[in-house]
Amino acid sequence: MLSFECDYIMGAHPKILENLIKTNMETMSGYGNDPYTASAKEKIRAACQNDEVDVRFLVGGTQTNKIVIDSMLAKYEGVIAATTGHINVHESGAIEASGHKVLALPAREGKLDAAEVEKYLENFWADGTCEHMVLPGMVYISHPTEYGTLYSHAELKALKAVCERYEIPLFIDGARLGYGLMSKRTDVTLCDLTHLCDVFYIGGTKVGAFCGEAVVFTHNNAPKHFFTTVKQNGALLAKGRLLGVQFDTLFTDGLYFEISKNAIDMAEKLRQMFISRGYSLFIDSPTNQQFIIIEDSRLEEIKKQVRYDYWERYDDTRSVVRFATSWATTDEDLKKLAEII
């Protein structure tokens, strides 16, 4: 069965497998106190062109979102996110389970607008009964968004300015960050992110690793006893080397960016393939997630040979489905898809 269901249907990049096997019998201290984790942190700092950033490794995206948000908010604060934001839609209430409400604002193609965020904050603090409400203590966005769209440098700068005015952190979910950075239509670099937000993470799970996310606190602002908070939430690996070796490999010789570019190249070909056959796009996504409008009757035939992600109903006879490319997508995969659609 051909699959474009998501970007983590494969295991790990072969070079990661090779290095895990190569280092398997080495004795190392646990909990990330090993030389490969230390090396991975240094390589990420170098890629960020910033020696001051604080890098921490967690096991997965949901744990990362929950722990970063919980550790940076007071118990009476909530987190602002787009209505379509991952933490608001696809985290099974993980944020709410930590005691923090997601304060959802309208999204435009999956993105928050700085002016609307500022208006919300202004109205909130102007309300004489605001102390009876959940206080907004953070702004959360993802880059790319759930719709594969990207924030421009100017949009991120505007959001950061609003957050600074109201003295709350801006947190960027980077589960698919590699695909955003390698998009041909972005003006945001990894280095830029260290100046445009307070914390972000570099996704490994969706970009070549078996598992793992690298959290980057941009100005030595990691919450006090963050390590302990990670452990309390079950996101600390005793064999921290598993994450260290993977990220050390991903950030050796630009591998992370190289394999992310493959997903973008494949997505462009996939996009043109559908367009050339008369299909319409639901949204103009510049990243590895492509949203196609397809007749329901045609979908019935396609799904017999291809896995995709059903997104939403478009009208009475058509649906929106997502086809996701990844670091592992090949031209042969696209050739087979072309024969089916």
Image: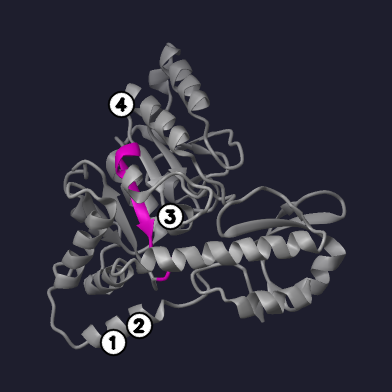
Residue corresponding to mark 4: 167
Q: Secondary structure at mark 2?
A: helix
Residue corresponding to mark 1: 21
User: In the image, what residue type sits under mark 3?
Assistant: Leu
Which numbered disc flags the more N-terminal residue, 3 or 2?
2
Q: Secondary structure at mark 3?
A: helix
Answer whether labels 1 and 2 touch (C-beta < 8 Å).
yes
Task: Report the magenta residues as a range.
Answer: 194-208
Q: Residues within 10 Å of mark 4 (few under 14, many from 20)?
A: few
User: In the image, what residue type sits under mark 2?
Assistant: Leu
Q: Is residue 111 above or below residue 116?
A: below
Query: Comparing marks 4 and 2, which lies closer to the viewer?
Result: 2
Q: Quadrant of residue 193?
A: top left
- Quadrant occupied by the N terminus: bottom right
Q: Secondary structure at mark 4?
A: loop
Q: Residue at x 32, y 50 (%)?
A: 67
